[in-house]
Image (tube, rainbow, N blue to C red):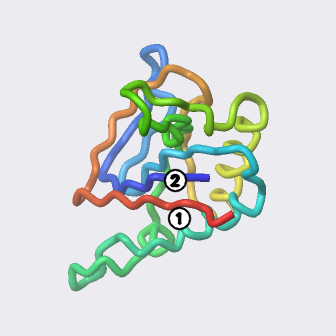
Amino acid sequence: MRVLVQRSKESKVTIDGKVNGKIDKGLVLLVGFTDGDNINNIKYLARKVVNLRIFDDENGVMNKSILDVGGKILSISQFTLYGDATKGNRPSYIKAMKGELATKLYDDFNNELREYNIEVETGIFGADMLVNINNDGPITIWLESEE
């Protein structure tokens, strides 16, 4: 499982011309799954995301988590995080988890984040989405489960 975390001032996801999810201060998560991912990966990365200290404290030091600042999360499914372009110029997505199981894990991940009393907005798994991210900093952190 992979999660690309971006600190955001405001972001939204639009599907078919309609805003599906929108946040102000918080985190945008691009979330991808691969075969073998399970609830342990989900719990590990959800805990890591909500405790990641990438928000400024009173002294301008990145020392606060989303839990500390009361931000929101915009979570976007992103199978292309498992794109592999080592051979040729057209990425292969063979390592990206497909279908029903990936959809379930994405929903489980978002629900796990909500267990921390954080508002989570989402896109729609597999939809053609327009994602507008106002990356604050810019701060972008790559997280990957260890299993």
State whether residue 11 is above or below residue 7. above
Which of the two discs, 2 and 1, labels the residue nearer the N terminus?
A: 2
Query: Which residue is located at x 30 percent, y 52 percent?
Result: 9
Residue 12 image offset from top left, x and y in percent: 40, 36
Disc 2 is placed on an element classified as strand
20 or 44: nearer the eye? 44
Q: What is the quadrant of the C terminus in the image?
A: bottom right
Query: Which residue is located at x 52 percent, y 53 percent?
Result: 3
Disc 1 is placed on an element classified as helix
> Mark 1 packing: few (<14 Cα in 10 Å), some, or many (20+)?
many
Query: Which residue is located at x 69 percent, y 58 percent?
Result: 42
Left of 113 or right of it: where is 133?
left
Give how far apart the Cα atoms at labels 2 and 1 are.
Answer: 9 Å
Residue 22 image offset from top left, x and y in percent: 44, 39
3 or 34: nearer the eye? 34
- What residue is disc 1 on? 49
Amino acid type for the residue under numbered disc 2: Val
Residue 133 image offset from top left, x and y in percent: 33, 41
Hey, which residue is sitting farthest top in the picture? 16
Q: Disc 2 vs disc 1: Cβ atoms closer than 8 Å?
A: yes
- What residue is disc 2 on? 3
Amino acid type for the residue under numbered disc 1: Val
Q: In which quarter of the image is residue 89?
A: top left
